Image (cartoon, rainbow, N blue to C red):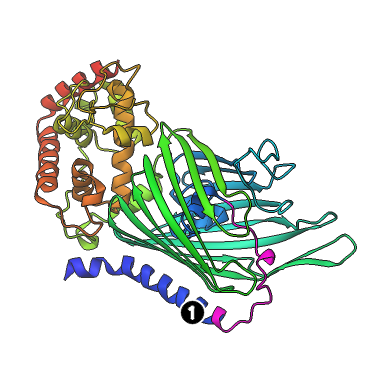
Amino acid sequence: MKNQLSTLPYRKWGLLLIAAAFLLFSYFLGQKSTSSDPINLRPEVGTRGIGLGGAFISSADDATSPLWNPAGLATLQRGNLIYDLSQGAVSLAYPIKPIGTFGVNFLDLNGGDRFLSDHVANPIGSFELGNNQALFSYARKFGPLQLGASTGYSRAPYYGSRWAQNYDLGVLTTLNTHFALGVRLRDISGVTIRHKNGQVLQTFDQQLALGTVFTPHPLIRWHNRLDIAPTCLGTSLEIGSDTIAARVGSTFTFGDEAPPQSWSLGFSLNQLGKQLHYTYLNQENLEHRHLVSIGMSFGRTQPISRKSDAVALSARKPDADALSAPQAPISKPTTQTQKREQPKSADKAIQIAKQYDIDVALMLAIIYAESNFNPSAVSKNGAGGLMQMMPETARELGLTVPQYQDKRKPKLDSYIDERFDPHKNLHAGLTYFKMLLEKYRGNLTLALGAYNIGPGKVRVAGPLISSGKKYADKVLSRSQHYRDNVAQMETDLKRLEALLN
């Protein structure tokens, strides 16, 4: 019964969001749109989102998120800059924990509305001239919910057009490992753009959109989107990982003036923090159908806030045990033990543990289980270094890792593969572990299991499969051994300190 009750707060948020989406849906169905002409809709911008058939409402997770759902900014762990070559759009976002993530988007910066030159040999296309927008956005995560808002100014594609302010809202939530839901509301109060002489040029009605992502397998994602007013349906299938993915999408519009159906093909590459997105958009009213954008991630992965840690770690108390897997509290050593376990020769190792708010004994136990303090260790799966980082994960966390034909035979040179730099490997590994600890809401057993077998195989509500459970038990047993045997802790602290120095 405890396990069932403990998941109710999380389910409650999901049910509330679904209920709110249904009410908004019902409200907008009863409204009569005054802007069925597609020219009166703010143009969709973003190579990746358009390549998903516009179904980027519940999967937005980069700097272009405010153009689809501002709540998507809350997922960013590093800064992100994206320039859309085909549509002249610049998107920039940066997370500042624990405050939240801030983003800016400037649309249609191309003077001639074509990238570089307006020539028949230039395959990269663009939409209308002069649909200028400037958006300023903010998003933050509140438990299972991601909330975001944007405000900015839009200009119509006419000389003499004035600027009009608009407001957007977005909500995202991941109900479980297979299903995510998003809601976006654009132009809350409606937007009217006028000419300098007072003539009405454009009117943007409120636009409500619902989105879902279904992930039956870690490498397969089915994106869907439904616009209520005007009615539009988008769907796409994406196959691949965060490193490389291909997609095919289709959009169906129900209106007299809009193309009734269009389809798209595209792919995305993400290597060493650099991104490339391409989409071919087969829409009958477009002359140039190739869309390209480039991007880059920058800055260190943002650490999880101590406030969030406190909330997450408090979930391990017996009365608030939220998960079915067994919990193992991180016990604090006595003052006398603290003095014994912090020799001067291990200052750097202890400071790193404090930086990530991780118990020293737990940090040492993870390193012991992963590599036994061997900075050159390579697993049969291709994980490397002290914390046994997989190449893809290490790259996402900002480490330089080459592309290997056989990842089980990496270059052990830390200047070529930074996983074999003990200091960088330890920081990356602890950052990743803290992300998992937040994902599993403070459940230490599940976070350890996910670190070992991958989060795709560990549900937020558990339980762990046998291999992950064995690994978690091994780490927890070793950490308790350190607490019971301070001499052993001091010995391994000195081993780690020697590697870091």
Q: Residue 102 vs residue 141: left or right?
A: right
Task: Give me the residue at 85% from left, 55% from top.
Answer: 160
Q: Residue furthest right?
A: 197
Q: What amino acid is at disc 1?
A: Leu
Q: Badge 1, how many Cα within 10 Å: few under 14, some, many 20+?
A: few
For this view, does 399 lie left or right of residue 102? Answer: left
Whether residue 301 appears in this view of the structure is: no
Which residue lies most toward the front here? 120
Residue 180 found in image quarter: bottom left
Q: Please report the residue visible at 34 percent of the width from the left and 18 percent of the height from the top.
A: 416
In this rendered view, identify the residue nearer to me: 212 or 222: 222
Task: Provide residue 32's location: percent of width, then percent of height.
Answer: 63, 81
| Residue situated in front as seen by the camera: 47 or 391 | 47
Badge 1 is on which residue? 23
Q: Residue at (68%, 61%) from the top-left corner?
A: 166
Question: Which residues are the magenta region?
Answer: 28-45
Quadrant in which the N terminus appears = bottom left
**Whether residue 35 is situated above or below residue 214 in the rendered picture:** below
Q: Quadrant of residue 454?
A: top left
Q: Is any atom of residue 282 visible in this view?
A: yes
Seen from the viewer's position, the closer of residues 312 and 445 is: 445
Percent coordinates x, y for residue 456 in the rendering: 25, 50
Q: Is residue 177 above or below residue 259?
A: above
Q: Main secondary structure of the magenta part?
A: loop
SS at mark 1 in the image: helix
Depth check: give the residue in front, 187 or 281. 281
Residue 100 horizontal/vertical position (percent): 50, 49
Q: Quadrant of residue 245?
A: top left
* Residue 31 counted in the magenta span: yes
Quarter of the picture containing the C terminus is: top left
- Does 152 appear in magenta? no
Q: How many marks?
A: 1
